[in-house]
Amino acid sequence: MAKKQKIFKPKARVPRGFRDRLGAELISEREMLARISAVYEAHGFDPLETPALEYTDALGKFLPDVDRPNEGVFSLTDDDDQWMSLRYDLTAPLARFVAENYDGLPKPFRRYQVGPVWRNEKPGPGRFRQFTQCDADTVGAPAPYADAEMCMLFADVIEAAGISTDDFFIRVSNRKIVDGLFEKIALDGEADAQTRLTVMRSMDKFDRLGAEGVALLLGPGRKDASGDFTDGAGLDDQRIETVLSFLASGPESSKRDTLDVIAEILGDTKSGEVGLDELIGIKASAPDFETRPILFDCSVIRGLEYYTGPVFEAELTFEAKDDKGRPVQFGSVGGGGRYDGLVKRFKGVEVPAVGISVGISRLLTALEYKQEAAPAAQGPVVVLALEKDRMATYQTMAAELRNAGVRAEVYLGGSNFAKQLKYADKRAAPVAVIQGEDERTKGEITIKDLVLGAALSKNIEDNKEWREDQPAQFTAPRSGLVDAVKKTLARHG
RNA sequence: GCCGCCUUAGCUCAGUAGGUUAGAGCGCUUGAUUGUGGAUCAAGAGGUCCCCCGUUCGAACCGGGGAGGCGGUACCA
């Protein structure tokens, strides 16, 4: 067989875990970001932008023993052999920025930041390798006042994003009361660090696996549905019992005040007491705390590494079904907390900081499910181009509409009448402006209401009728273009 | 990372127990219905049957390896 000369033809494909996004989705994201940013700015946070790449050592993601960055971050070497990585969150770049510009910044320093972050992980449903975060942080303010503000801000921001206060709440805990728990079960020794990690990871799964699953993970280990086995922490029954009662102290399972329950379990431990005081402080410095969608819940763990005090998590509570009818759990759409050690890596001095991070992509997905059958985004008014030598007049019409604040474009594709309407249809144009020879000689235009037409067409079988009646269009004098279009648009909101 | 399932047209999927030209529906393109979206009708384009290696006279189909997708699990700043 004669070999065919193969011309290399790359396969057109988006990289795994990444997405192309278009039109309506981008617009609603932009609007959501604008609403969130407005809330941040109203609270006095200044915008900050930092680059996508940071030196890897600044991100703190070198593996401890190998001279290579953590696998979870996308990394490359600069031409001077220094490792750089795409940022995996907005907090590490903030710490770098604050350390680098420490002396010139007002303290406390309050900034918000919006942008994409990248994680080199296995993508999953609703989980991508590039996604947008929207953070606000206060650097240089000790607990608990800034923490209280962050809780309230968090709730305001999620609400501003478009989630009603019945559909989410901010769960608040404190890393220090977890330390108190470790004291209580005598796991606070130097040698128990590894076990503590395992215990926290298990606790973090409380909402997903429930008490039984967590009990297994705390004890002998657990075999999951795929047959994979996860090693347990190896605690004895009594300690497991203590941990579970701690987790179950949350508001769902207890009629009593969560803080009272925690105090009963941990009150006699040093860290527990400090942690509790901070939570009480948050409650005391937030006005109308009880009426806000904020509650204390000890099963909130968040990241294992850098949080040092209060931790927050925004959780959506409404249920939705995916396109195959299966229930979708949205879970966390943002998190945050106090991290007093982050700037210390650069400066040596401890700089207290607290912040929140809102996951825009997840919120958007959730909102899509929430507004089932969301009204499709409306396209531009399309001015048809029927007479090729009259393009200038069509452009004039479009410009008139734009000047009147109406999104409008001229059809530029060079096809016939039917194709042009088909194009307008596909663009979700609400209105087509038509001026062919007939209208022109009479000094008129035809306004076609495409939304109404689509509705009427459902009841029409016969093509002749469909074509001749044209109930969805009317003529107007050329000079009345803007008024006629606006009037038609107003019919459909 | 680990376990399981899957991969045939743009999409959803048939199909042949290995045999020449691989199919459907939807979508797309073009045209008809005198200058009108839908419906109808006619024609058309579009496939290395995921990739590589092997077995075979012959592989989209069988075997091995790989990649990608889905689901679970682990990790998660």
Image: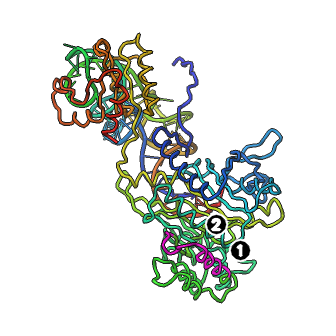
Question: Which residue is labeled 1 in the image?
Answer: A193
Q: Decide: is A55 above or below A267.
A: above
Identify the residue at image location x=37%, y=21%: A384
Query: Do marks 1 and 2 share a chain?
Result: yes
**Mark 1 near mark 2, Cβ–Cβ under 8 Å?**
no
Q: Is residue A492 magenta?
A: no
Residue A164 falls left or right of residue A115: left
Residue interval drawn in magenta:
A274-293
Q: For the image shown, how many numbered marks are present on the structure?
A: 2
For the residues carrying marks 1 and 2, which lies nearer the camera in this image? 2
Q: What's under tag 1, amino acid-wise?
A: Ala
Q: What's under tag 2, amino acid-wise?
A: Gly
Residue A480 falls left or right of residue A273: left
Question: Which residue is labeled 2 in the image?
Answer: A337
Q: On what subunit does the disc labeled 1 rest?
A: A
Which numbered disc, 1 or 2, marks the residue that appears first in the sequence? 1
